[in-house]
Image: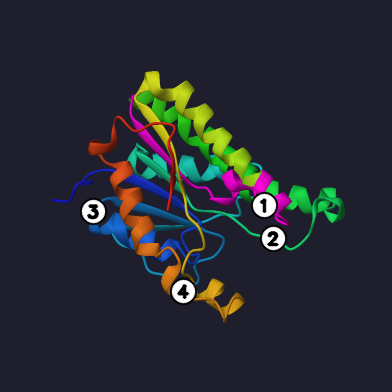
Amino acid sequence: MGELSGRSVLITGASGGLGKDVTGAFLAADARVFAVARSWGAASADDRLHYLEADLSEPDAAARVVARVIETTSRIDVLAHLVGGYAGGTPVQEITVDDLDRMLDINLRAAFRMIRAVLPPMIAAQRGRILAIGARAGQDAPANLSAYNISKAALHALIRTVAAEARAHGVTANAVLPGTIDTAANRKAMPKADPSRWVKPADIGALLVWLAGDASSAVNGALIPM
């Protein structure tokens, strides 16, 4: 039996460049995975892998996803929120409010809705792990990434707030802050870069699995750089 045997794990953004590796890591740890994406096409599920389709930009989508998981398994032990987006190349004086809202929608509001939806069942169970993918840029604030920096910094603040509020109920909240992730999309966008220096998705998956397990119970409110 794996370290997460019997645990129900909800993964958002599971079809993205990071999602396959994270899903695989949780399945290898013997978890029951509910993988969320906007569309899965012909993907086939089994007893331990369930595919859910939802557009998390819709205000009620998170609550519907959580309700379906609870209907199926009566519990959510882990939320691994991978949804995120990137935009850059523009200084502050040229950023529009729409540009900022777009990053906030993708990187903050979707996470806020998912976390708000999973907290009641986790608090009722008096246990849970909330995990999110932040960004080094949310701390370092490099130039010409203002909307992205702000949205990720806000996500970090959300995670730390949840960590402080939920710890009395056995729920922890942590974020992993990678630099550039070695995905097909990033390789295409930066063909001259050296991907050997980038963060490997499998390494992120391994860290998320550890954070989801019993060994990490004392880790709460951490923003972990990679």
Tell me the CA gap for discs 2 and 1. Answer: 6 Å
Tell me the CA gap for discs 4 and 2. Answer: 20 Å
Report the span colored magenta: 126-150
Callout 4 amino acid: Pro
Residue 132 located within the stretch drawn in magenta: yes
Read off the residue under disc 1. Answer: 148
The reply to whether the C-beta atoms of the residues labelled 1 and 4 are less than 8 Å apart is: no
Q: Where does residue 118 sit, x and y in percent of width and height?
A: 47, 35
Q: Where does residue 107 sit, x and y in percent of width and height?
A: 62, 48
Read off the residue under disc 2. Answer: 87
Badge 1 density bin: few <14, some 14–19, many ≥20, Cα 10 Å: many
Look at 52% across and 48% down and name the residue there: 134
Q: Which mark is residue 124?
A: none
Read off the residue under disc 3. Answer: 29
Callout 3 amino acid: Ala
Tell me the CA gap for discs 1 and 4. Answer: 22 Å
**Secondary structure category for the residue under label 4:** helix
Callout 1 amino acid: Tyr
> Which numbered mark, 1 or 3, is in the foreground of this view?
1
Tell me the CA gap for discs 3 and 2. Answer: 34 Å
Residue farthest left in this picture: 1
The reply to whether the C-beta atoms of the residues labelled 3 and 2 are less than 8 Å apart is: no
Taking the image as shown, residue 15 lies to the left or right of residue 111, namely: left
Taking the image as shown, residue 76 lies to the left or right of residue 86, namely: left
Q: Where does residue 17 sit, x and y in percent of width and height?
A: 48, 67
Q: Is residue 103 above or below residue 170?
A: below
Q: Is residue 121 above or below residue 208?
A: above
Badge 4 density bin: few <14, some 14–19, many ≥20, Cα 10 Å: some
**Secondary structure category for the residue under label 3:** loop
> Which numbered mark, 1 or 4, is in the foreground of this view?
4
